[in-house]
Image (cartoon, rainbow, N blue to C red):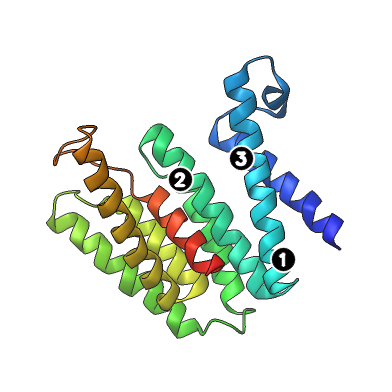
Amino acid sequence: MSIVIILIGLALGILTYSYSFDTNLKNIFSSNNKNRIKGLVVVIGVTTVTYLLYYQYQLTNYFIAMELTTWFLIITTIRDCKDKQIPMNVVIITFIIGVILVFFNPNVIWTHSLIGFVGIGGIIALISVLTKGAIGIGDALVIGTIGLILGYKMALAVLLYSLVLSGLIGLGLMAFGKVNRKTKLPMVPFMLCAFLIIIIL
């Protein structure tokens, strides 16, 4: 089974790389070192996380939910950094799969999923409107989708951890003169880091 999981991880890694960078598999093995490094980092990273999740949760519905969330966050992180926007087609696909998973995941109560998506995601969306985009609507959709798949407790934990991380990194960058107070850092990468910290701990 471990070999199957590794193969699934490799396939997801290749899919993630191809979609995120609008390219194909051959670029991983191209003579362009930059493309090769990006491709290998994404594929190896996704495969490693997939195997670690399987090792921790085995082949359960919760493993599928965690894997879906990880894949979703990796893709949205790359696109957020690269294009400064959240791909809506990925959000919609993940949302649909997430809704289906809610009814088959005994680890998450459907009311917790509803609170996670509507409550946590809705609050962030409201803050986005009130602050005129200080936090993007896309960020609200991402945190809301996490809440849908894994419940409001996970969404809240990811949100709090990501805010702390972004604050610390922001202060560090300001101290070295890399950014100023008006600089908007992409939020989704911090959500990914927060999520990985939570599942590792």
Q: Which of 26 and 119 lies nearest the eye of the viewer?
A: 26
Mark toward the viewer: 3 or 2: 3
Q: What residue sits right under mark 3 in the picture?
A: 42
The percent coordinates of residue 77 (x first, y second) are 45, 45
Under circle 3, the secondary element is: helix
The percent coordinates of residue 166 (x first, y second) are 30, 52
Q: CA distance from mark 3 to mark 1?
A: 18 Å
Instruction: Give the image quarter of residue 62.
Output: bottom right
Q: Badges 1 and 2: C-beta atoms under 8 Å apart? A: no
In the picture as drawn, the residue positioned furthest to the front comes out as 176
Dot 3 or dot 2: first in sequence order is 3
Few, some or many residues within 10 Å of mark 3 (<14, 14–19, 20+) = many
Q: What residue sits right under mark 1 in the picture?
A: 54
Mark toward the viewer: 1 or 2: 1
Say which amino acid is labelled 3: Val
Under circle 1, the secondary element is: helix
Q: CA distance from mark 1 to mark 2?
A: 22 Å
Dot 1 or dot 2: first in sequence order is 1
* Residue depicted at x 48% and y 67%: 198
* Residue depicted at x 41% and y 78%: 153
* Residue depicted at x 56% and y 29%: 22
Indicate whether 64 appears above or below 108.
Answer: above
Say which amino acid is labelled 1: Tyr
The percent coordinates of residue 171 (x first, y second) are 22, 47
Q: What residue sits right under mark 2 in the picture?
A: 77
